[in-house]
Image: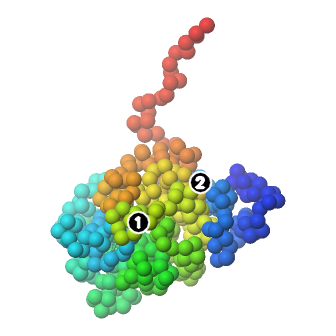
Amino acid sequence: MQSARKIETILQDKTLEAPLRQAAEKVFEGQRITESEGLYLFEKGELAYLGALANFIREQKHGGRTYFNRNFHIEPTNVCLYTCSFCSYSRLIKKREEGWEYSMDDIMEIVRKYDGEPVTEVHIVGGVLPQYDVGFYSELFRRIKAHRPELHIKALTPVEYHYIFKKEKISYEQGMRLMKEAGLDSMPGGGAEIFHPEIREKIAGGKCTGEQWLRIHEIWHELGMRSNATMLYGHIEEYRHRIHHLEQLRQLQDKAGGFQTFIPLKFRNKDNEMSHLPEATVIEDLRNYAISRIYLDNFDHIKAYWPMIGRNVAQLSLAFGVDDIDGTIDDTTKIYSMAGSEEQSPALSTRELVNLIRRVGRQAIERDTLYNVIEDYTDHEFEEDQAFKGYTALPVVNKN
Ligand code: SF4
């Protein structure tokens, strides 16, 4: 395997520092790296070295397979009671009339817009406001399931759950059970930001703590359900905070085992209270994907969220540990376009997404939320691509 040969080449390098050699040996032998080794990778690991290690793990787990799913997003509101300093939504609480606050009927209208479309998942997440409470979301999930029972509902993060359960005066356990009964299928990974209180209190003070975020996922996993995890990087955190964050996730995964996918989220600096900070470079984005892949040995998947990093970096990420690209979605997603992403209208057709994956030599696999294969696009020909067959049919002109 090409990716194994690259690690063998790294190990032959006599100039490689001992801790980097040790980490490479561990990865080659399928062993877990420690927190201090992880920190060393962040501080000293060069891009090519990290890419070789991460790609080896990625290909051991998935070969060239790259997953995507067909989903659509609903953000019930872009107004929020909290004041997270990285979030472009929080500013609207003072001028509420500029935002949107969908009613139950508005949301059901969006769901109905996708009737007959081959989407398998609805992703619901947005701001926190009092009218969106346990009663509202329970009824919403029930109505979606009554309308389209096979549609997978991936909805809300511990930030919302912590708020609505507290308001209802019920425990996390009672609350998550109610959500499951109402039709919730899985939880997205948002709201994790950075768990370490030194950073969390500065950028996301007031909302659920890191421990509470982890506890709600743990309870959900104990109910036999699945969820994802994220990390918001590239702002005021240091590498040690990132490693602390990854370590908390790795420990919970050892214990409860319900995480499917880890999604690193890049801090974007438009229209929020941290706009003065520079954004992480593309090199830092790729290093971060690679170290996430290396560190989280008990996570099956690492996902790149292309509306946030752009299509080209998403393609590159597939050589740095990423095996999943989210997703074919439409412009109902405003979180990242409002925060300054290059992708102001994040929509890709299935053909565009498949070709984006193929162009970097990977196999495109459509999956459902739980990673069951829906279609393997490896040999699939799209009608639009058949129309143009290249220049091979042109006559050869002899210029002599
Ligand atoms: S990150 Fe979430 S909780 Fe924080 S202000 Fe934005 S929408 Fe609200």
In the rendered image, the vertical position of residue 214 relative to residue 398, given as above or below: below
Mark seen at residue 319: 2
Amino acid tagged 2: Ala
Residue 333 horizontal/vertical position (percent): 33, 60
Q: What residue type is labelled 1?
A: His
- The residue lying at 55 percent from left, 54 percent from top is 318
Under tag 2, what secondary structure? loop
Side of 242 relative to 345 (left or right) = right
**Would you say 392 lies left or right of 18 here?**
left
Quadrant containing ligand 1 reads bottom left
- Which callout, 1 or 2, points to the residue nearer the camera? 1
Q: Name the residue under label 1.
A: 276
Answer above or below: position of 378 versus 20: above
Q: In which quarter of the image is residue 127?
A: bottom left
Q: Which of marks 1 and 2 is nearer the N terminus?
A: 1
Question: Residue 240, percent across and down?
Answer: 58, 76
Measured Cα–Cα span from mark 1 to mark 2: 31 Å
